[in-house]
Structure formats: C-alpha cells, structure tokens
Image (cartoon, rainbow, N blue to C red):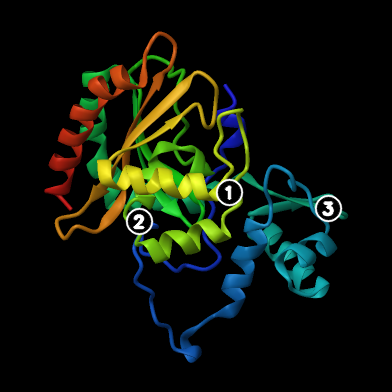
Amino acid sequence: MLWPVIAQIVRLPVRDRKDSTGVGKNEVHVEPDDLIAGLGRGLAVIECFDDEHSRLTPAEVAERTQISRTAARRYLLSLCHFGYANTNGKVFWLAPRVLRLGQSYLLSARLPRLAQPFLERLFNATQSTAGLAVLDDHDVIYLARHSGSRQAKGGVHLGARLPAHVVSVGRAILTSFSDEELDAWIGAHRFASFTPYSERDPARFRAEIVRARDLNYAIADQQLELGWRGIAVPLRDRHGECVGALSVTVPTEGKSIEASLTAALPPLRDAETGFRALL
C-alpha cells in the first residue's frame, strides 16, 4: 500500500481562513491588538517539517518559514523546551508530543463523533472502507473512518492528509465551490501525479468537477493508487453548506465503474441524508 507513505499526520494550518470543517468560507476578524503573531510563526515552524524535510537546521527553517535565522533558532529551542521537538545541537526534528495538537481536534470536534455510526452502516452496506474527510486548502484530512474488524486493504489512516485532486472526497467537496472559487483553487493547485491515471491537466480536472457537481457525486478511479477506486458524496448541513464528504473505497479488479456505483451510491446518499439532519 502506498497511501500510508503518501499520507501525512494532521498539521495545523498556518493561516486559519476556514471554519472548523476546513470548508467554510467565513473568516474570523481579529483586531491587531488581539493578534499574537509569534504564535502563528511558531506553528509555521512546526508545519515546515514534513516527510522530505524531517530534520532541519535553523537556517533551513528560516528559509522555509521566511523568518530570521535568530528567530528560527529561538522557536526551535522553545519547541525543544516544551517537548515538541528534539535536537542533537545541529539539526532539529519534531517529537511525538506534536501529535497531541492534531489529536486534540479529533477528540473535541463534533463532526467525527457524529460520523461514526453512519460510517459503520456504510461499511455494513458495502463491505468497503468508509470515511469522512474535510478540505484544508489543497489537501483533504480524514477525520473518521470505518473498515470493520479486519485490517483494511483500501483506505487511509485516521488523520491522513492527501492531495485533494486525487481522492474522491476532495473532488466531492470541490463540487460545492462556485465557478470563481473553483478556478482560483485550480490555479493555485499543484497537480502531482501518483499513478498513470492521475489527472494533471487543470482544464480536464475542472471539467470533471463540473460534471461531478451535476451528478452530486465524485469518483477518483486509480488516481492515487492502482487497483483502488473512491466514490464520494458531498456532506451538507441543514442550511446547504458543504462541511466535508463521505466516501467508500473499493477495489477495481473485476468491477466496472457502473457496478461500483450501483453498490455504493445508494448507501452513500442514505448516509448523507441521515447525517445532514444532525448538522
């Protein structure tokens, strides 16, 4: 499985431009006197670490966060002091305590707790891994999942972060964007390729999202990993606002897209309808 390698643990966004679901468009206005810029820079230092930059010097952190080397060193040493980073005197790396930041959201957020019964029903109806994800800028984050008692072969782990263009949940959420919002999102997105089927052409991707908007569901067929197909529907609250997406992940072997849709789409839509009544 490539997904656990591609996926990353939940990171806090440097610029919190969305509501708690990562989809809303309302901004929180903060007066300059109430803003602690240093907190934002500290979070940016944490976020600059990833799978390709797991160990960094203060100079490298300064370059990646656009702060001075002196400030980067102070932030890194402060993170070490509070248990969020470690160092050998030359390079720094994150400590396991950082996971508490993402875990605090998963434990306190209402959406993942409400989702679990619906995901269990989805799994029972389809015998396929079911998940709930939200959009965070250009990635999706999986907040809840259910794969039964067995070890899931298809799907991602809880808290995984993946590029939105190659997963069905990302595409389903994008169907809620206006044409102007979609164009802006596509213009700023990096269309990385993971399989020969990964869509890298912005114009074709836009056409796929517009078509999915008309159908009210989205498919990602072997876009992220060969042999796996994702089907998702946007999850809306009672006011019609998109707050995420529900999905199932099915193997492609021996199943046409039409057969997968016939099996997965009715239970997905039933789950979305029931879930919406609680939001």
Instruction: List x then y, in percent, for residue 277.
Output: 11, 48
Name the foreground residue: 259 vs 65.
259
Badge 2: residue crowd in 10 Å (few <14, some 14–19, many ≥20): some
Residue lying farthest top? 254
Type of amino acid at the residue the image marks with label 2: Thr
User: Residue 23, percent across and down?
Assistant: 36, 58
Residue that label 3 marks: 91
Q: Residue at x 41, y 43 (%)?
A: 208
Residue 265 on image: x %, y %: 24, 29
> In the figure, residue 127 lies in which quadrant?
top left
Q: Secondary structure at mark 2?
A: loop
Tell me what residue is drawn at x 63 percent, y 67 percent.
Answer: 42
Report which residue position mark 2 lands on: 21
Disc 1 to disc 3, how far (Cα)? 18 Å
Q: Nearer the viewer, mark 1 or mark 2?
A: 2
Q: Is residue 75 left or right of residue 241?
A: right
